[in-house]
Image (cartoon, rainbow, N blue to C red):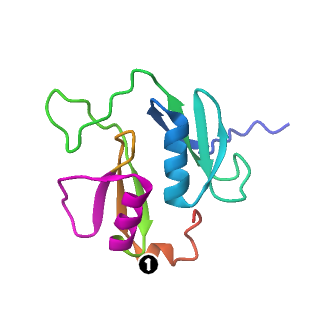
Amino acid sequence: MDNELIIKMYSFTLDCKDPNLLAEFYAKLLKWEVMFVSEDWACVGPPGSLQGAYPCILFQKNPDYIPPVWPEEPGAQQQMAHIDFAVNDLEKAVSYALDCGATLSEKQFSNDWTVMFDPAGHPFCLCLMKSVIESDHFALL
């Protein structure tokens, strides 16, 4: 019997008021699939993958969820994490994300990435990383 400890990333989980809405947004944005939906949970993953084949993005219902303020402001709800997405064309990616239902942050700090918000108010970044996307080592497409 093997007693070696195994730890693998299963998901990145985001709290929200409507898991299905957020799953549909990220499925559209990433061209992924909604893997499952329930009243309290929803999950998206790469097309054709089985649940657990890749890390997924999981959405957890929290009726008391309050969107973070970014950039942070004293006394306001702070972000605890955000997701960075590598893109090969930043302008096209921003336009596409807006079409999917994202909003653009009024404040930006670089020409190499753009900060946006998903429909629940979570910040995420579209990062110009053409060399990463074209790398043989970039797994999640």
Identify the image quadrant of residue 88.
bottom left
Which quarter of the image is occupied by the C terminus?
bottom right
The amino acid pointed to by label 1 is Ser
**Element under disc 1:** helix
Would you place residue 94 above or below residue 10 in this image? below
Magenta stretch, residue numbers: 91-116
* Quadrant position of residue 15: top left
Residue sitting at x 72%, y 40%? 4
Q: Quadrant of the N terminus?
A: top right
Query: Is disc 1 surrounded by few (<14), some (14 to 19) or many (20+) residues within 10 Å?
Result: few
Front-most of 47 and 113?
47
44 displayed left or right of 119: right
Q: Position of residue 58 (x, y in %)?
A: 56, 40
Q: Is residue 81 left or right of residue 31?
A: left
Can you say whether 6 is above or below 76 in the image? below
Q: Residue 26: where, in percent of width, then height? A: 50, 51
> Residue 3's x, y, as percent?
76, 36
Q: How many marks?
A: 1
The answer to whether residue 87 is left or right of residue 69 is right
82 vs 90, nearest the viewer: 90
Q: Which residue is mark 1?
A: 131
**Relative depth, front residue between 112 and 102:** 102
Is 99 magenta? The answer is yes
Residue 25 vertical placement versus 65 (above, below)? below
Q: Residue at x 16, y 26 (%)?
A: 75
Q: Residue at x 24, y 52 (%)?
A: 105
